[in-house]
Image: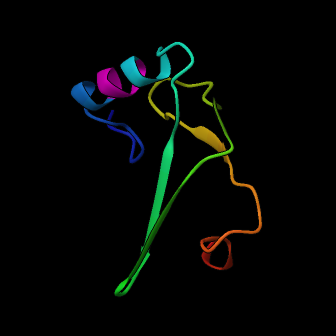
Amino acid sequence: MQDEFDLPPETRDAVSRIFHLYDPPLWLVTAGDGHRRSGMIATSVTRASIVAEWPRMLIAIASPNSMTPGV
């Protein structure tokens, strides 16, 4: 039975490879709204998944910065 949150196997594999990186040097967070675009380096990133088919990340963003009004 296909759940609406199920990801294709190749996507789950790609996410799993990212999750298993040891101490990645940085994580870039980007956002867009209409014609506005912004990006910044996350303060902290950690895995927050319990179920492999529903990959989740917890991303901490320090304030103040130019992106926080839209976050």
The image quarter in which residue 70 lies: bottom right
If the image is split into quadrants, where does the C terminus sit?
A: bottom right
Say if 24 sits above or below 4 in the image. Answer: above
Query: Which residue is at 61% across, 47% downward?
Result: 42
| Magenta-span inclusion, residue 22 | no
Location of residue 65 in the rendering, given as x and y in whole percent from the top left corner: 68, 69
Residue 45 rendering spot, x and y as whole percentages: 63, 36
Q: In the depicted view, which residue is nearer to us: 35 or 55?
A: 35
| x then y, percent, for residue 50 | 62, 24
In this picture the colour scheme is: rainbow
Any magenta on residue 15? Answer: yes
At 65% from the left and 32% from the top, the residue drawn is 48
Q: Residue at x 42, y 74 (%)?
A: 32
Q: Position of residue 69 (x, y in %)?
A: 67, 79
The residue range painted magenta reads 12-16
Q: Residue lying farthest right?
A: 63
In the picture, which quadrant includes the N terminus?
Answer: top left
Q: Nearer the viewer, residue 6 or 15?
A: 15
Question: In the rendered image of this protein, does residue 30 appear above or below residue 46?
Answer: below
The answer to which of 19 and 7 lies nearer the viewer is 19
Question: Is residue 10 left or right of 29 when viewed as pictured?
Answer: left
Q: Is residue 70 left or right of residue 2?
A: right
Name the dominant secondary structure of the magenta segment: helix
